[in-house]
Amino acid sequence: MNPLNRDDIWQLLCEYTQSDLLRKHCLAVEAAMKWYARKFGEDENLWGNLGLIHDLAFEKYPDQHPQKDGEILRELGFPEEWVRAVWSHGDALNIPRVTLLEKTLYAVDELTGLVIAVARVRPSKKLADVDVPAVKKKWKDKAFARGVNRADIERGAAELGVPLDEHIGNVIAALGAVADTLGV
């Protein structure tokens, strides 16, 4: 498997993931990773593909996430850099995030979900009508998107070294490029 071939990555994701919602989450993380790769002068294709595949086995093995995701990537011959990034994109395995790639994946993962949720409750249901104040307003409502861990988002922005409001704005901008695909 060539980790730089986006079509191969998409096919692999679709083999493991039937849920349209989870596929769209992965597409959102892909867009955010590509956006940050451009910002940091990194390989946009590589970062985007990692974002696309980061939750590969979540649907089939939710109780073993992200351990199983990384194990499958390793078995398929993906680079160890990807395996470690997938394993560290959550806190369950207690793997510290040390590379910029790892920190970015962690920082964008939860936030993409919150931004999309905010878009879905706007009167227009469009991402184009979402801004940082709208996200921050919904952030305070603990009942809203209760599955989104706000502490993880704050920790991710801090580890990335990007102020939270700026990070939210960056992710909104990133998702704008794929808003139609995401249905927002």
Image (cartoon, rainbow, N blue to C red):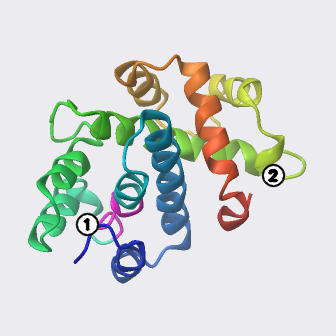
Q: The C terminus appears in which quarter of the rendering? A: bottom right
Q: Which residue is drawn at the image coordinates 30% and 72% (left, top)?
A: 60
Measure the alpha-carbon separation of dots 1 and 2: 32 Å
Residue closest to the eye, 130 or 120: 130
Q: Mark 1 Cα within 10 Å, few/some/many (few <14, many 20+)?
A: some
| Quadrant location of the N terminus in the rendered image | bottom left
Span shown in magenta? 52-59
What x and y, as percent, mark residue 13?
37, 74
> Hey, what amino acid is under mark 1?
Tyr
Q: Secondary structure at mark 1?
A: loop
Front one among 47 and 147: 47
State whether residue 52 is above or below residue 81: below
Q: Residue at x 39, y 28 (%)?
A: 156
Tell me what residue is drawn at x 65 percent, y 22 percent: 140
What residue is disc 1 on?
A: 61
Residue 133 in percent (x, y) is at: 75, 23
Q: Seen in the image, is 18 located left or right of residue 15?
A: right
Q: Position of residue 5 (x, y in %)?
A: 35, 73
Q: Which label number is shown at residue 126?
A: 2
Q: Amino acid at mark 2?
A: Lys
Circle 2 sits in a helix, a strand or a loop, which is it? Answer: loop
Asked if residue 157 is among those painted magenta in the image, a careful observer would answer: no
